[in-house]
Amino acid sequence: GAVVSQHPSWVICKSGTSVKIECRSLDFQATTMFWYRQFPKQSLMLMATSNEGSKATYEQGVEKDKFLINHASLTLSTLTVTSAHPEDSSFYICSARGGSNRDTQYFGPGTRLTVL
Amino acid sequence: RKEVEQDPGPFNVPEGATVAFNCTYSNSASQSFFWYRQDCRKEPKLLMSVYSSGNEDGRFTAQLNRASQYISLLIRDSKLSDSATYLCVVRYTGTASKLTFGTGTRLQVTL
């Protein structure tokens, strides 16, 4: 099946720093990528949707200047959490759609961010 | 009201038991329905799609009632390895096919 990777799998950073998370589709071209956030014991919440070569569409309540998304190629999307604060600590999961089964979303393994 | 609602559990059942999870959704424009499984600190993985006619995959049976906006998942002959959180997921029409997740129902299968 299709594989989506994320890097890093976990990161600990100081408050005020920026963190970049990479999401790659390894064996298919992802026309659309999604970024989710999941707090403990809560559901996955969609943060933004990005299509290759165009600006991301952010969900209501998600600050686009704080969560910068770049989808520069069909196999790579990045999420940068700028000026991270402890309340940004969460599990960030990307998902990609494309390839031969265009209707299926494949999830990456997630990145656990802890901001001290 | 949440768009997708589930009983968070936990459901503690002995090995071999049959267990059922329910889910309700609020948007009647919902188009597609899924059950995902999520293990602790891992990403969600698709368990099965849910069709109006009901569908079965081994020990797992999913049912959809569009009139009541209700989805169910039945697990027969529970295994220890079934312990996980089960997420009810819907996809709405006209919204770029975004998935909306429930908070999940936690299942713990014990010896």
Image: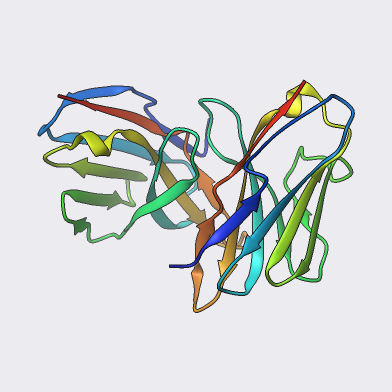
Question: Looking at the image, which is closer to me, A35 or B21?
Answer: A35
Counting labels gives: 0
Q: Is residue B41 left or right of residue A110?
A: left
Q: Position of residue B101 (x, y in %)?
A: 50, 43
Q: Is residue B29 visible?
A: no
Q: Residue at x 58, y 67 (%)?
A: A26
Question: Looking at the image, which is closer to me, B104 or A16?
Answer: A16
The picture quadrant where one finds residue A33 is: bottom right
Residue B31 drawn above or below residue B10 = below
Q: Is residue A22 left or right of residue B13?
A: right
Quadrant housing the C terminus of chain B: top left
Q: Residue at x 83, y 31 (%)?
A: A84
Q: Position of residue B105 (x, y in %)?
A: 37, 31
Q: Is residue B21 left or right of residue B45?
A: left
Q: Is residue B16 visible?
A: yes
Q: Position of residue A37 (x, y in %)?
A: 64, 39
Question: Looking at the image, which is closer to me, A105 or B41?
Answer: B41
Q: Is residue A40 left or right of residue A87?
A: left
The picture quadrant where one finds residue B8 is: top left
Q: What residue occupies the far bottom of the structure in this picture?
A: A100
| Rendered image coloring scheme | rainbow
Q: Position of residue A92 (x, y in %)?
A: 64, 41
